[in-house]
Amino acid sequence: MLGGRESRSAAPDEPPSALPPFALTERIATGVRVVAADAAASAFGVAPGLRLADARARAPGLLSEEIDRAADAAALERLARWMTRWSPAVAVDGRDGVLLDVTGCAHLWGGESGLMADVSARLDRLGLRHRLGLAETPGAAWALAHTASGQITRLEGDLGTGLGDLPVAGLRLGEEALTLLRRFGLTRIGQLAGIGRAALARRFQSAEAADRVLLRLDQAMGRIAEPLRPLEPLPEHSARVPCPEPLIDQAGLEAAIARLVADLVKGLETAGLGARHLRLIAYRSDGTRAEREARAARPSRDPAHLARLLTDRLEGLDPGFGIDLVRLEAGALGPVETAAPPLRGAGAGEAQDPAALAALADRMASRLGAELVTTALPQESHLPERAEQRRAFAGSLPDWTDAVEALPEHDGLRPPALFDRPEPVEVVAEIPDGPPMRFVWRRVPRRVVRAEGPERIGPEWWRAQPGGDAGTSARARDYYRVEDRDGRRYWLYREGLYEDGQATLPRWYLHGLFG
Amino acid sequence: MMLKQATHLALVRLSEPADAAAQADPSALLAAMGESGVHELTEARFGDMPALTALAALVLGTHARPGPVLWVTEAALVREHGRPLARGLLGFGLDPGRLLTVAAPRPRDALWCVEEGLRSGAVAAVVAALTEASFTATRRLALASEAQGVPAILLMPHRREGATAAEARWRVASAPSAPNPYDPKAPGAVRWQARLERSRRAPWATGRQFELEVDDATRSLGVVDRLAARPARPDAWGAGEPLRRTG
């Protein structure tokens, strides 16, 4: 477990005197207090907790600004997400810390010291002052990062001896508990461990306060498990490609994707699984990252297909000052269906490969958006707009056999083209239920020569909204199939009847075209 | 799969052929649309797009080999002429269970989808309603289509003119429907006029005009003579009743 603590210094390379001292302040109940100070201000003795007036007295020419906690938290989270480059299990810790679970990751940097050196070097490059601690438990790592004497500390020996000399402030305790412990003369973590638990509990006024101290102590010592709650769900399968020379163009990224996919597919093959969701994360050298996601309709581990899905999504990915690490995560895993095409008999030699169709749909969905690549599912409804549901392609084509069988013999014809919203038309028709004789649609008057109807479709009152728009109100529709003098065939309906007791007169709409 | 609403295309040529060489079999010409190559169905006038949609469904249901169909529509055409309705296409003999539909926001996306579909080898046919396609674009599609042996049927608006790499270009218009034997006031079997504007395979048939009729009652080819084809008097009904403007 690696615990880190960050603070941004205005300019780490310049001598403190080059810039006027600067501090961040916060308005609290007792006035304006300093919450953070840069190196120049610290040199004058400005420390967090000081009143702004006192700080100004200590550091003449002190510049100050109110802290923006929300922006701070957002920046810390961005940084933490970027730090997934070292391990996917990353959590934000408080206002200024990041916890990484680096179990099993250190070998990529040649061991723990190599890993810590790399973290430190990259944070330095971003101009972030930091302290690092590495230990077996989050609590111990936190203690090292916050209270150890060195800037980068690894736990020496076991937890008991390694933490023994650290101050109790390293135990993530509240201000009250720390004050109390100081009064008892307990300043080092090792002293706490020596005292019997019952004895320690007796010294605190409440059992809860003692429990809190003991809990933190147990967590640091690894007696109580403290699982990390990662910012992002941990992928079961992932691959990474570090780039010694930062990538700045698409060709480089495509080459990286080819390697990543090959690595990922190896893991998927061993597990006998395919992925329906891919996430590509590109880490830029300036501490930001870019992401691209691709989805497949059915689980796949075909390297060519997966690589193609990702490269199709690369458009608009800004490499910034260069990408020095690319990671690929696989999600939504499932078994890969492999169907052998029939060699003889019916269907032999036909292109009926469902995987090929899914691959085609994936590529189109990846370019256009999944909601635009659809199939139509039959639904039990008489309203034409509800009788079929457009649904994003989900791996296979729907089966209409049953729906076709179930079609009522006397169900009227349906037009091959239907408008998403029925278009209002002006109609001249016989009262109360004659077919249209003339109508104006899109400003063009049309004279009806022949008409068929009505086909009455009752309202689905259980779904209707009273007073709703066309298509939602609970009024019956009378559909007519009409033909004009040019041979154009239209599908019109009158919404409502003349004697249906509704306040408004029936209205006419054009819903579809027969062609 | 047997469709209850199976529909057959009856081809009726109403005019006598001028000579024996011109006795082009329209059904064979249309059947070519089920084979590889790009085939254009073009509106005769604005508003014939639904007729093209229905004709494409008919041809696919009758002549194309079985298998999935990729149906691409440009968003602009959806707003103008409506969205293909599965139940409606079923009425023209195309099983909606074969359809994978794509609504492409831009013309270039639509062309890209068509080409992907042709090259994938995963579909039996591709239909695309496009607002435009340059000669180069149609050439690309033709090459992709022939490489995989998958037909592409392009539905194009009425302003479509000029060079194309397509096998054929049909200009299709809605025509007054056949008389309805049961109800003279109602529309009968759907008819379209189709003129073969260009054809690589049958250049001798270029310029011919055919009257196509969808026969969904008898499921057979029928010949209708011109007298019977005349529509019933339009104003036969509705006389004497008070009229009122509504809507």
Image (cartoon, coloured by chain):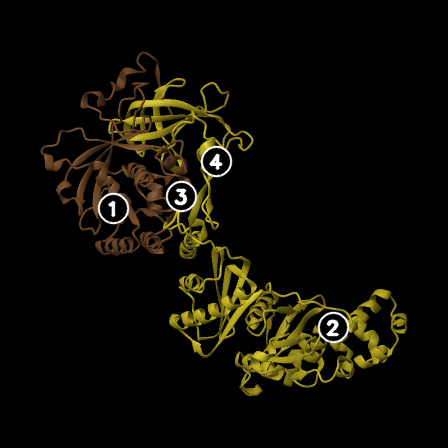
Chain colours: A yellow, B brown
Q: Who's the residue at 40% across and 34% down the image? A: B3
Mark 2 vs mark 4: give the one in front: 4
Mark 1–mark 2 CB contact (< 8 Å):
no
Q: Are marks 2 and 3 on the same chain?
A: no
Q: Which residue is mark 1?
A: B39
Q: Which residue is mark 2?
A: A172
Q: Which chain does the residue under circle 3 lie in?
A: B
Percent position of residue A389, x then y: 47, 40
Percent position of residue A53, x then y: 67, 76
Residue A59 in the image: above or below residue A375: below
Marks 1 and 3, the one that precedes in the sequence: 1
The 10 Å Cα crowd at callout 1, few under 14, some 14 to 19, many 20 or more, is many
Q: Nearer the viewer, residue B155 or B77?
A: B155
Percent position of residue A124, x then y: 55, 81
The 10 Å Cα crowd at callout 2, few under 14, some 14 to 19, many 20 or more, is some
Q: Is residue A62 visible?
A: no
Separation of marks 1 and 2 at Cα, in angstroms:
74 Å
| In-image side of B136 versus B54 (left or right) | left
| In-image side of B109 versus A295 (left or right) | left
Marks 2 and 4, the one that precedes in the sequence: 2
Q: Which residue is mark 4?
A: A402
What amino acid is labelled 2 in the image? Arg
Q: Which chain does the residue under circle 2 lie in?
A: A
Q: Is residue B37 visible?
A: yes
Mark 4 vs mark 1: give the one in front: 4
Q: SS for tag 4?
A: helix
What amino acid is labelled 3 in the image? Arg
Q: Which residue is mark 3?
A: B98
What amino acid is labelled 4 in the image? Asp
| In-image side of B93 versus A205 (left or right) | left
Q: Who's the residue at 23% across and 56% down the image? A: B136
